[in-house]
Image (cartoon, coloured by chain):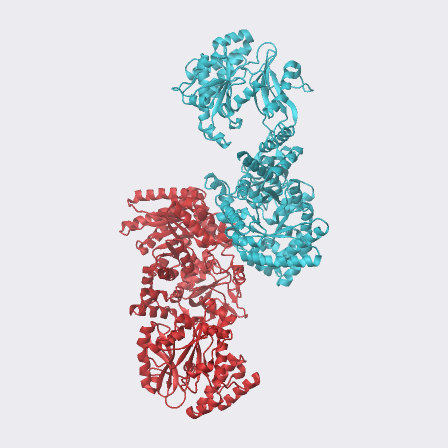
Chain colours: A cyan, B red
């Protein structure tokens, strides 16, 4: 058909080697079919309808179907398949056997046999009724689709519903199919679904009209699919199914045979050795020319192989990594492309065990998927029980209303965490992500009876301590019993990809790591040092907690110093271990941050115990606990405010850091520790703390005789610190933006309390996203930019970074890179994601420039 | 003496009518003496040393004293007095009788009598020893200064300490006096003291050298001071003392007589009627020509009056107001000058009762002076007891560890508040200032035994319920018993000044007023409307609190609405009363702000009561209370977050506001209420709330048939709201910056918890000032500027204001005026201060331009 100036664009094009077919005008399927044609594969005659053409159809300008069908010979029977720009965007389902009518049915019955003819016609009537005439699918359900009776029933059903005969004119049939597919694409649901997958508002749909090769009839006939990798692992192997006397993707449904000869019964290799050989022979060239691992749909028609279609193999993230790395290693695609083919977030899937998606799921409860991965274990209701469980080598799930810093050791001991309260940024969620522990929070449908050690499910069922559940932190589902789990596959491909990403990324990645175990993971994931080592958890271990409490209860600076003196060697050992593991990489240690009351017991029983331990009257303990309690601990006496008012704590920590550095340096591994002051809001805070820390450093240098170096920096967590960065920066070597607290203060929103309304807020689109999860570039981000720009103004060499939970998010990394930050620091388990996100950003910049 | 180019400037000038004497070169005293000379008053011969001259003396270039003394005749005896630019900046004390030595002593003994001669010489030796030779004052103490023995003793003491004879050369004496006074001015302490009073770093000192008129000897001799107003009230009346045979300011110390003839014994009027007549005759011309109320120092020398000096009368703030207004009313100074003569902060003194500064004080305890004024009452330890006390018409002082919103009614009932904890911005302090209630917070030396209803003082003394104390909120002193109090004097002068200030100020002032009582005060102090009416206190009254709790415990939106429906008429009545009082002035009502848990009981007993009232199991109440409790209430589920998630509350309030407005308008007093949304952090919050409020307004208009108007606005309390002002402003008519919360969030600092370290922080100059007390212009102020600038960018007509505690501070007002704000809103008791501060700023701009 020709376009004339008076007519809308409704062109269609026969797919040949040289036809003007492009992905952005005809869609991916049309282009792929042209490529297969160019590889001399036996593709049936196919016509491609462009996006413009389909858009015209939706508006009523249907091309002359008679004319189109003419190019398919005398008795055309065709299929129509969608061809959008990106196959992920979806599209209407394929419709086969268009052109079947009473006359052709009769002829087919003679040529292919009655049964085959009945099936072909029945199938078409079903599809047409449901997808074109939009009739109720139930009315067209048949069990025995290859019987004459089935055909009769569906034809009668059609006539009954539509009060007219099933359309017999093939051109009319095709026109109606095209129109219905074009309109389906314009439907609101379809549009929303594809936009959610990233399609632009004006994404077009192409269609391909292909001559039907039936796979039914006499001789060796059948259809199947083949792929050349295992979609779970990405390893290269021949996989697929073949089904005799079938068409479409029937082979995937029922009693098909395997392709390759092995012990599993008759194979296509045996049934049709010539076709099998040809088919498998296509593997290498498809991979090399299409630069992808493809799944091929084929038909054997009376012993002859035809290739109908090929699509990218759907695969797991580990498989995607392996395929991309293999293609790059085989020089089929450059490394850069391999990097760009993996979505950074997809890497998290590699790092955790997953519930087998194919296994049945008995979902007890749903909550917020706060930390990915899955684990099975017995329910425990307290940190102590979790530790006892660990001591017995029994996996356990810690179930709490919410977690608090005292629960950290319990969280370490548990395999997963489930909490009734809290959001993406609750204590449980943040710590679990840091530990790489599966975690579900905000499971508000459960009722926790802590004293009775029971939890009541929404359906009234109860679970008790010791009952087995599985927490799927990737989906937010709590499953009954031990669900089938898939192990993470951290293999060569992943490690190779990580190295490439690190080479390409122009923003560096560090890890937030508090413990030697964290540090080990950080190194494994190629973190360039530790960006945030929180020191407070170090005081929660039992013997230390007692000393800590003695320190808090000390009546004089001397008593306080005495308690701290006993903590010093423990801290020093902590830091030394970290320095040793990080082998010369930077380790940024945040000085003590939390309010002191976090270290005191809150229950009467705990206070009584403490009174005993400290040999004090209970009333004294109660009074002190009460005196230290705060209305808004987040905004209270913590961070540098403690450093100024109880300077002995920072003195001790600085000494521990420097002595550890001196020892490690003396052992031949030079280390430059970084000391970070938390919660700064005024320049003078930095001046005062800096003076004391410089003094401690000088003392340690003099006493040890080791000339170690160190860097002092500030954690920017208050809006004021960002606004005043210009006067703060000259006093320090680095500024690290703590985006968790900065978000809390910029919004006036406690992350511990936000859970109560955050879901409602996101639902009503008050906030586009939970700002604790996705960096709020408008508000918090502006403070980051202001801080960075002002700090650089007065101190061009200052190192800038972020070290909040946001550090591992690709969007935050993009923002920080744009703002000229030197590195991001995130949970060890997010480090690979961050490296890859950094690489993507660098590569995209190269492509655009 | 003449200056030559080689010599430093050491000029001195004889004060004559035409001599080149200026305040900024010779100081205020020199200038004043010249003015007295010009008024033909009998001023003894006086020489003025300029600032440059005195600076030269401090550096060693002392002018030739012999030369200077020559101008005082053959046997000169002189005094030296300081003459700084502003008398408030202090300066060295006067030294009299310079020139006395053995020879002159002998002559004087003949002329004036031995006793007089002894006294003159003794006095000089004492002054010289202490102030010039810097010897120990104790060594020169004598009881009988007019005895020959006393003279002998001081001369011997001098010789003993200095190992030399008392200097006999008058020129040498004068040189040493000048040098010592010049150097004293350069001392560090003197410098710091005057800089604290606002003196510039290079403030100069002038000196005046004056011929001594002795006031001793034969005939009527004596000295005295006179002033023409009462320094307490400012009312015009003759006051002063006269002492025969005395010099200097001796008349103020001991057994002097009054000036005017009355019943109090012999007066100067009787002793020396001619001098008295001359002296009192000077009153009018002094006032008119010097444009001030002056205190005059005079000597009667053998029946002849001499005027030695005149200084501005020290006066209380009420007196200052009266004098300024009187001078302006008498056209002696313009109104503008009258306004500028009153420090805005001084007005607070007028508005509260004060402890009589002259009465004895038995200080029990010291704390932070959190709200000015003084009150006496019986100690009570709970809000309930305070209310009971009020019911009995007994003044009481509420003593608490700290106050919480539940205590508000108790605070209303009390005469003053004293708390153990908290700082300038604690709940108690803020509310007390709002109520104009004397308040001391952070009295951390007291031990409160609430259960036993006792408080233990630092010295171990105990006080119990019912014991009488006086709280001096202006000084921070807690006094024993009923101290003598001075009533505030809110007289005509004050009211006149306020009117003038309002006329001149180009930034408007509103009041933060929650109750009809507040609103009445606001109107009395000429507030141009209410800038912040907090509505939450309205829910704490007993019947309302129960309904509020029912609302919180409601299981469905319908139940919730039912409870709110019963609150509606009460709120409507509240608003109607406010609208009526404000008679057409704008009333800005902040929608409900605090977290709901503030309305629930915290004790087990309270919960049990509530369970009874709501007919619910105790466990349900406990569970709900626990579920609503928050880690950081300041950053939690409050403000607009409640408006979004529990919209029924705002619906009810909007309805109450609009129905009240419609009723008042229908009664003929059109009112345009302003509705303010608190704690906004995102534009969508405003959109959502606005839509509902517009709907309520439409419903009320339809139902009432009254076409009232209203304005919607946003309270900017989060840094993010300031940063996003450009997108928020187009949706609203006004933005009001809540600087209390904005400060909390900008610093990451809870005002309730800051008390624990704020004093330490200010002491170490980490913060220059408590940012809750003085607006932090660097950090919080920048957010104000950013917010204002961006809001005006998108909505040039938007009204801008601040409504935090800072609204009444002159510095904050200056800042807001500079940033282009339309008004400030502050506690009713700060409104006069704010008006005057605004007037000062406008006048200073006029002067500078």
Q: Position of residue A833 (x, y in %)?
A: 59, 38
Give the residue at the far top of this rendering: A110
Q: Considering depth in this image, is B645 or B743 the residue closer to the camera?
A: B743
Q: Residue furthest right?
A: A667
Report which quarter residue A187 is drawn in.
top left
Q: For the view shown, which residue lies furthest in the bottom direction?
A: B110
**Taking the image as drawn, is residue A523 in sight?**
yes
Residue that sits furthest to the front in the current view: B5
Q: Quadrant of the C terminus of chain B?
A: bottom left
Which sits in the foreground, A840 or B525?
A: A840
Instruction: Judge from the rendering whether residue A46 lies leftward or rightward of residue B806; answer left or right.
Output: right
Residue B819 position, x and y percent, is 40, 53
Q: Residue at x 40, y 73 (%)?
A: B28
List x then y, in percent, for residue A560: 63, 60
Q: Is residue A623 above or below residue A258?
A: below
How many numbered discs?
0
Residue A461 in sight here: no
Relative image position of residue B174 (x, y in whole percent): 47, 81
The image quarter containing residue B36 is: bottom left
- Is B459 situated above or below A797? below
Q: Is residue B296 above or below residue B511?
A: below
Question: In the rendered view of the protein, which quadrant contains the N terminus of chain B?
Answer: bottom left
């Amino acid at each position: 058909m020709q376009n004339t100036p008076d007519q809308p664009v409704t062109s269609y094009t026969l797919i040949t080697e040289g036809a003007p077919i492009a992905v952005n005008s005809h869609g991916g399927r049309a282009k792929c079919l042209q490529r297969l044609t160019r590889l001399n594969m036996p593709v049936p005659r196919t016509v491609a309808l462009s996006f413009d053409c389909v858009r015209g159809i939706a508006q009523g300008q249907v091309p002359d179907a008679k004319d189109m069908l003419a190019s398919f010979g005398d008795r055309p029977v065709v299929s129509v398949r969608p061809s959008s720009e990106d196959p992920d965007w979806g599209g209407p389902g394929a419709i086969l056997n268009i052109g079947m009518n009473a006359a052709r049915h009769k002829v087919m019955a003679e040529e292919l046999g009655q049964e085959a003819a009945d099936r072909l016609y029945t199938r078409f009537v079903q599809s047409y009724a449901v997808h074109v005439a939009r009739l109720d699918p139930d009315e067209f359900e048949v069990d025995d689709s290859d019987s004459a009776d089935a055909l009769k029933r569906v034809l009668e059903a059609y006539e009954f519903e539509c009060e007219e005969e099933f359309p017999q004119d093939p051109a009319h049939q095709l026109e109606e199919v095209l129109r219905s597919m074009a309109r389906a694409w314009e439907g609101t649901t379809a549009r929303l679904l594809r936009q959610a997958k990233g399609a632009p508002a004006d994404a077009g749909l192409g269609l391909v009209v292909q001559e039907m090769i039936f796979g039914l009839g006499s001789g060796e006939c059948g259809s199947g699919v083949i792929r050349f990798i295992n979609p779970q692992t990405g390893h290269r192997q021949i996989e697929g199914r073949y089904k005799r006397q079938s068409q479409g993707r029937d082979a995937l449904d029922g009693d098909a045979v395997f392709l390759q000869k092995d012990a599993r019964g008759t194979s296509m290799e045996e049934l049709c050795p010539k076709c099998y050989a040809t088919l498998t022979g296509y593997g290498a060239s498809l991979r090399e020319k299409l630069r992808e691992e493809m799944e091929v749909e084929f038909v054997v028609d009376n012993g002859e192989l035809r290739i109908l279609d090929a699509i990218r193999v759907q695969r797991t993230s580990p498989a995607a990594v392996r395929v991309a790395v293999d293609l790059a290693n085989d020089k089929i695609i450059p490394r850069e492309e391999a990097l760009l083919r993996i979505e950074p977030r997809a890497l998290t899937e590699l790092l955790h065990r997953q519930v087998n998606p194919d296994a049945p799921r008995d979902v007890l409860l749903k909550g917020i998927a706060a930390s990915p991965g899955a684990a099975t274990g017995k329910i425990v209701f307290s940190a102590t029980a979790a530790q006892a469980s660990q001591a017995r080598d029994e996996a356990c799930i810690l179930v709490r209303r919410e977690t608090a810093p005292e629960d950290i050791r319990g969280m370490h001991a548990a395999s997963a965490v489930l909490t009734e309260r809290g959001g993406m940024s609750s204590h449980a969620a943040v710590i679990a992500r840091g530990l790489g522990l599966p975690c579900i929070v905000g499971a508000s449908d459960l009722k926790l009876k802590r004293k009775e050690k029971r939890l009541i499910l929404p359906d009234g069922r109860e679970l008790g301590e010791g009952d087995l559940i599985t927490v799927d932190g990737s989906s937010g589902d709590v499953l009954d019993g031990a669900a089938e789990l898939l192990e993470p596959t951290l293999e060569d491909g992943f490690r190779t990809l990580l190295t490439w990403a690190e080479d390409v990324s122009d923003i560096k990645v560090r890890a937030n790591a508090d413990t030697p175990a964290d540090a080990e993971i950080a190194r494994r994931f190629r973190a360039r040092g530790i960006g945030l080592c929180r020191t407070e958890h170090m005081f929660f271990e039992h013997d230390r907690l007692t000393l800590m409490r003695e320190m808090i209860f000390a009546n004089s600076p001397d008593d306080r110093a005495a308690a701290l003196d006993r903590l010093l060697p423990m801290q020093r050992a902590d830091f030394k271990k970290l320095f040793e593991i990080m082998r010369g990489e930077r380790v940024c240690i945040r000085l003590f941050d939390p309010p002191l009351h976090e270290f005191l017991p809150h229950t009467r029983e705990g206070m009584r115990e403490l009174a005993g331990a400290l040999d004090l009257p209970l009333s004294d303990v109660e009074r002190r606990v009460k005196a230290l309690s705060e209305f808004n601990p987040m905004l209270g006496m913590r961070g540098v405010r403690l450093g100024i008012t109880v300077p002995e704590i920072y003195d001790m920590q600085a000494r521990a850091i420097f002595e550890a550095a001196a020892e490690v340096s003396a052992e031949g591994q030079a280390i430059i520790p970084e000391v970070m002051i938390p919660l700064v809001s005024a320049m003078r805070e930095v001046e005062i703390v800096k003076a004391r820390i410089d003094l401690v450093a000088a003392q340690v240098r003099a006493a040890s005789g080791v000339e170690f170096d160190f860097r002092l920096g500030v954690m920017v967590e208050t809006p004021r610190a960002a606004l005043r960065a210009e006067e703060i920066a000259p006093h320090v070597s680095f500024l690290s933006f703590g985006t968790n607290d900065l978000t809390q203060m910029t919004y006036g929103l406690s992350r511990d309390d936000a859970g109560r309304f955050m879901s409602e807020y996101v639902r009503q689109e008050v906030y586009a996203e939970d700002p604790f999860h996705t960096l709020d570039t408008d508000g918090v981000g502006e403070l980051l930019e202001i801080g960075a720009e002002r700090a650089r103004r007065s101190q061009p060499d200052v190192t800038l970074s972020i070290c909040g939970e946001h550090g591992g998010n690709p969007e935050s990394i993009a923002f920080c890179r744009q703002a000229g930050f030197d590195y991001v620091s995130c949970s060890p388990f997010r480090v690979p994601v961050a490296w890859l996100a950094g690489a993507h950003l660098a590569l995209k910049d190269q492509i655009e420039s």
